Image (cartoon, coloured by chain):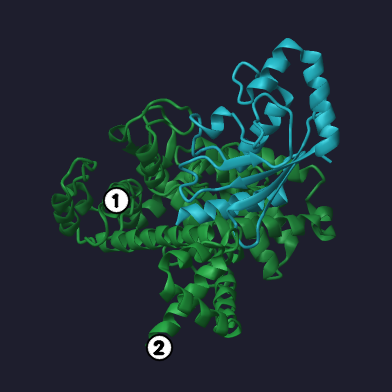
Chain colours: A green, B cyan
Amino acid sequence: MSLIKYSKISVEDPSDWSGTMMPSVSTLDSMLRCQICKGFLRAPVVTSCGHIFCSICIREALTTKGKCPLCQEEIFESGLRKVLLLDGVVDWFKKHRAELFSNLKRAEVISDSQEESSERVLPSEKSSNVIDLTKDSSFNITASNYGKSTVEQQTLDISHISKQSTQQVSTASALETSPDADMLVQCPVCSKYMTIEKLQGSHIDKCLKGQSDKDYKPQSSPRKSSNKGTGLHLRNDFEIGRLLHSKKRKHENGSFQLQPGIQKKKQRIPNLDVMIPTNRLREKLNLYGLSTGGPRQKLEARMKQYINLYNANLDALHPVDDRVLIGRLSRWESLVEISERQDDKARDNGKSNSIDAIQNAKQNAHSWKVKYRSSYKELIERAKASVTKLSKDGAADNNALSAEKGGDEEAKREA
Amino acid sequence: MSLPKRIIRETERLTTDPVAGITAVPHSDNLRYFDVVITGPEGSPYENGKFKLELFLPDEYPMVAPKVRFLTKIYHPNIDRLGRICLDVLKNNWSPALQIRTILLSIQALLSSPNPDDPLANEVAEEWKNNHAHAIETARDWTARYAK
């Protein structure tokens, strides 16, 4: 029953992209997922056989079985290495997924409309876009789609955009000559060049509202100078941008793969020695601020899971505080407990384990008590007469067992 | 937790993008329990049969394999009278990278190519090896009788 609520959560899936202008994004989408949990990679680590999983998932898997889930090669936890850059890539994708999705969806609607197709979108346009995207100019296309749809929303002149888009395609070759070309895209509104992050982040909105982006100096449009050395001009633009941005850019580039400094000082917790005496285990749990209650088996499971969570956290680009880990641990523990309790119930009631069934059972017990009051009395009498005989009757069926219970209570009241 | 989310994701995929010849529907009161129907593969003695199975995802899933059992009687060297299935990916070769979809596909493939050298139902396997034509006939007969 606790599981049913999950069905209301909408779960993103690589297949979502099949209905968009660019179904091939689904490949990227599924590549950025862990093959164990099928979610986006969290603190990805690479195994000695070259396969990548969430740190926590592969650690949990290795607790059960020391083989790679993908190739069945024998691997060891000690051989796992974090892949910080990939963590950043996944992070970017997760952040921009909804935006990318709605734009690719909307772009398709626009390209289907008549005015677009008469202006510039030929029947082959859609497929050529898909091919183009696999090439170097991928960012340009993405940006043009983005710009196009956003501008469309603002009901600006479409022919204006299409001119710019074609111009953009023509400058794309020039861009390729620049070493930094793949980092730059043109804003479809003000024709300035900038990084895709910058464009999609704040620039495009500002531009559409008519606010000039103060991070970039107003500059002559490359359209004017396109006849003489566009490449050079672009590079200059970029360098100006870089000069203006030097502080911020440095920070951004660095943080792609840098974990916070504290992280380096933290040591991994070694795997739990299963022979550890219970009192030492309690000390250990206490050391990390964990609960020391419960039987030995629970303590062990708790410690193991915390070690997995802790070590996996060290693999994350943006690790969380230990207190968050303790929160996750207690959530994990309550989940385990719920399922254990459900198992018990399932054993008692057969397949149905809903609250209703239990309440019905309670009511039934009550009505039984009322209905068979006289029988209970008789039973009590007999019980007093012969204990052995009662146990025989009681074993007859389950209801008789509950009848005994009710009878006992009445017997107490009578006494 | 990632665990239930993975199960939801798998369930959604199974319903939106079903595998040919396989349906898997979760119980409304227990999303870990699935009613499965596998259609007998073409060219096998199980052709045109509709085989009911039950599939259960233990709490440890995907770290341990799902539990799968045939509910429909079937004459097969790797499936015993209780419907238990002898299949490596359900036992030692389970990997958390596998999923419900792949497991059911493996079972479908097992119907296409029985393996009497690694039997679970010994008598069936003997018959399969020593009197192949008769075994196939029996399998076809059982399919017509029970797997409707």
- Residue at 17 percent across and 59 percent down: it is A286
Q: Secondary structure at mark 2?
A: helix
Q: Quadrant of residue A191?
A: bottom right
Q: Which mark, by number, is residue A156?
A: none
A339 relative to A274 in the view: left or right: right
Q: Secondary structure at mark 1?
A: helix
x, y (%) of residue A12?
A: 59, 55
Q: Which residue is mark 1?
A: A297
Q: Is residue A383 above or below residue A238?
A: below
Q: Which quadrant is the C terminus of chain B positioned in? A: top right
A278 relative to A141 in the view: left or right: left
Q: Which residue is mark 2?
A: A413
Mark 2: give few (<14), some (14-19) or many (20+) Cα within 10 Å.
few
State the residue in front, A320 or A186.
Answer: A320
x, y (%) of residue A236?
A: 44, 47
Q: Earlier in the sequence, mark 1 or mark 2?
A: 1
State the residue in front, A153 or A320.
Answer: A320
Chain of the residue on which disc 2 is drawn: A
Tell me, yes or no, whether dots 1 and 2 are on the same chain: yes
